[in-house]
Amino acid sequence: MGQTLSTLAYLVASVLFIMALRGLSNPETSRQGNLYGMIGMGIAIIATLLRPGMGAGGIVLVLAGLAIGGTIGTLLAQRIQMTSLPQLVAAFHSLVGMAAVFVAAAAFYSPESFGIGYAGNIKAASLVEMSLGLAIGAITFSGSVIAFAKLDGRMSGAPIIFKGQHMLNAALGALLLVLVIAFVATGSPILFWLIALLSFALGFLLIIPIGGADMPVVVSMLNSYSGWAAAGIGFTIGNLLLIVTGALVGASGAILSYIMCKGMNRSIINVLLGGFGSDSGAAAGPGAGNADRAPVKAGSPEDAAYIMKNAQKIIIVPGYGMAVAQAQQVVREMADLLKKEGAEISYAIHPVAGRMPGHMNVLLAEANVPYDEVHELEEINAEFADADVAYVIGANDVTNPAAKTDKSSAIYGMPILDVERAKTVFFVKRGMASGYAGVENELFFRPNTMMLFGDAKKVTQQIVQSLQK
């Protein structure tokens, strides 16, 4: 009876998780989606605690783990800056991967506890599931650690490439497959740990050649890996909820990665195995290193305020620079003032703007920007030609016309926001440094572009002050 109730509770939790994903697919229902997810997780935890055979000791351990993890999570949520969300997500993925490794080890050394056999004689099907969960979990862990280090600036975002890299990865992949087959045949502890070590190495080698421009896709793919690792371990220990939720996370992460790669005109194989782009050195001052080009036009916030005050249609293009400056609130304030002047305001979001899927949407939602003013690339690109002003605030690579014209460019083929078609482009940036992909932006030198050099928040605040005069 107790097992039946536990299974039913897991099914209810699974349905709530599906509803959570559905809710999170739209900004207007995202809060409701989060609520469904939290309720589902609460039911799952209670059902786990009430499972037959848990015992007082097991309940104490689970509650202790919840207390420790919950405390750490609460402190991180309170202290984390919005700009640090991508690396935080990568760090969380690494924890999921390592959890899968630990559960696989627990199942291997104590199979009786999971009903999959006994030491030295584990069911072959369980060994297959265990080895897959172990390998994917280890790859997720080390890959996520590298992604975290790149996103957090603790190592270069540039691709780390060496001769024969792909051949080495292919050879290690083949060796991993051989080890899994041998492990299933023998159940050897040595092979178990060799699979783990080789997978840790593969995760490291798969992520280091991926450049900064591809980090949003990497975060999404690692999310998918963590889900498949959880699902594999769920099969091993016979946990229905882990199987369902792992499959949901794995499938949704893979679909999101595909959508983002389509948005960059790249194949997933190209992104994950090749990597492209690199980040540049320190930011240069206005006009530095561009003697062979027409000089950029540098303007002032007062100039921008005057032109925007007389504009009818303005499209705001947010990017990672807005996140760094925490300028989303003042951007919305500027938009509100311009709407009072009779301007039509829209926000244009590129699929890979920022360093995490949905990064810009989260920031704009935090600033209470109306959902109906926020548009994806496909919806708004045609409107730039009719816009009086495009206000680009820290979005570099996703506005670079080189993606359409320069076949030698690292971002060639990536669909971009056609901001250059607006009558006037205001580009807010600290200096003339290239974007995260390491590519100089041709838009800086267009005759209809005016650079507004400075901190994004301070520049926008000065525009607001000028609009209020």
Image (cartoon, rainbow, N blue to C red):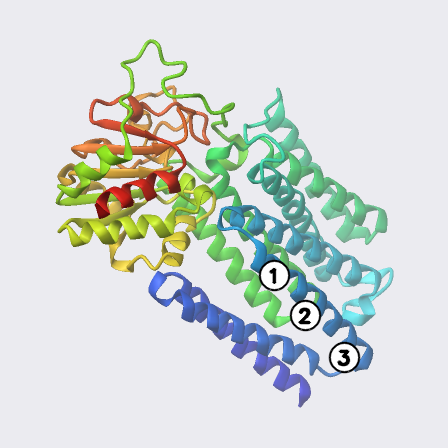
Q: What is the quadrant of the C terminus in the image?
A: top left
Q: Residue at x 66, y 28 (%)?
A: 168
Query: What is the spatial separation of the Cα atoms under label 2 and label 3, in whole angstroms?
Result: 15 Å
Q: Which residue is the extreme one toward the bottom?
A: 1
Say if 162 sits above or below 131 in the image.
Answer: above
Q: Which residue is mark 3?
A: 54
Residue 173 image point, x, y percent = 65, 38
Front residue of this view, candidates 50 and 431 = 431
Left-right relation of 289 to 382: right
Residue 229 image point, x, y percent = 63, 55
Q: Which residue is mark 2?
A: 238
Circle 1: is it few (<14), some (14-19), or many (20+) Cα within 10 Å? many
Q: Residue at x 61, y 61 (%)?
A: 231
Quick check: can you spot residue 297? yes
Q: Which residue is mark 1?
A: 231
Circle 3: is it few (<14), some (14-19), or many (20+) Cα within 10 Å? few
How many numbered marks are there? Answer: 3
Say if 257 sits above or below 459 in the image.
Answer: below
Tell which circle, 1 or 2, labels the residue nearer the N-terminal end: 1
Amino acid at pointer 1: Ala
Tell me the SS state at disc 3. loop
Residue 148 image point, x, y percent = 60, 43
Tell which circle, 2 or 3, labels the residue nearer the N-terminal end: 3
Say if 301 sits above or below 22 in the image.
Answer: above
Tell which circle, 3 or 1, labels the residue nearer the N-terminal end: 3
Amino acid at pointer 3: Met
Residue 409, picture quadrant: top left
